[in-house]
Image (spheres, rainbow, N blue to C red):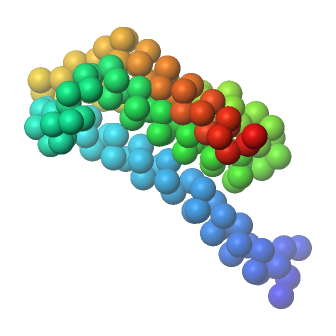
Amino acid sequence: MHVNGMQNGSRVGRLWLLCWYWAPPLVYAALIFAFSSLSHPEATLPSFLTALGDKTLHVVEYGVLGALCYRAFRSAAGVWGARYRLPLAILAAAVYGITDEVHQAFVPLREASGWDWLADTVGTMVGVVGWRYFREP
């Protein structure tokens, strides 16, 4: 059956594709937001993670977000998004890092930090380039 020139099955397939690729970075971003909402997030983390240090945690955390964004732009953002997936993924995760720092400024006992955002952005670049290197030889 055709609806507006599009088969019903391809519409469902497109929706599934969008969910498959965009749900992981969105859910992961929501987890980042949830941990940023805690006054003492270190109390909820395993001790081996807190032993890594604050900036290392930021790099790892945003490395994962960057890789997930890259994956989504590569596979479910259309031709233009796929072509510019590397800068778009870095931009998306880095901008999210800014919003995360602003959000933390309003959480009791937390503060916004440009150094944290820089660690977020470095982590994003590592995650994006790493994903590209290992998944697109």
Query: The N terminus lies in which quarter of the figure?
Result: bottom right
Q: Position of residue 86 (x, y in %)?
A: 69, 32
The residue closer to the viewer here, 25 or 54, is 54
Spot the residue most to the bottom: 1
Residue at (84%, 74%) from the top-left corner? Answer: 6
Residue at (15%, 37%) from the top-left corner? Answer: 47
Residue 113 horizontal side relative to residue 12, left or right = left
Spot the residue most to the right: 5
Residue 88 in sight here: no
Q: Position of residue 24 (x, y in %)?
A: 49, 53
Residue 41 horizontal side relative to residue 119, left or right = left
Query: The C terminus lies in which quarter of the figure?
Result: top right
Quadrant of residue 18 within the rendered picture:
bottom right
The residue closer to the viewer here, 12 or 132, is 132
Residue 134 horizontal side relative to residue 36, left or right = right
Residue 4 horizontal side relative to residue 106, left or right = right
Q: Position of residue 135 (x, y in %)?
A: 67, 45
Residue at (59%, 28%) from the top-left corner? Answer: 90
Look at the picture and state if 132 lies above or below 8. Answer: above
Residue 111 in sight here: yes
Residue at (82%, 46%) from the top-left corner? Answer: 79
The residue closer to the viewer here, 42 or 102, is 42
Look at the picture and state if 39 lies above or below 109. Answer: below
Spot the residue most to the top: 115
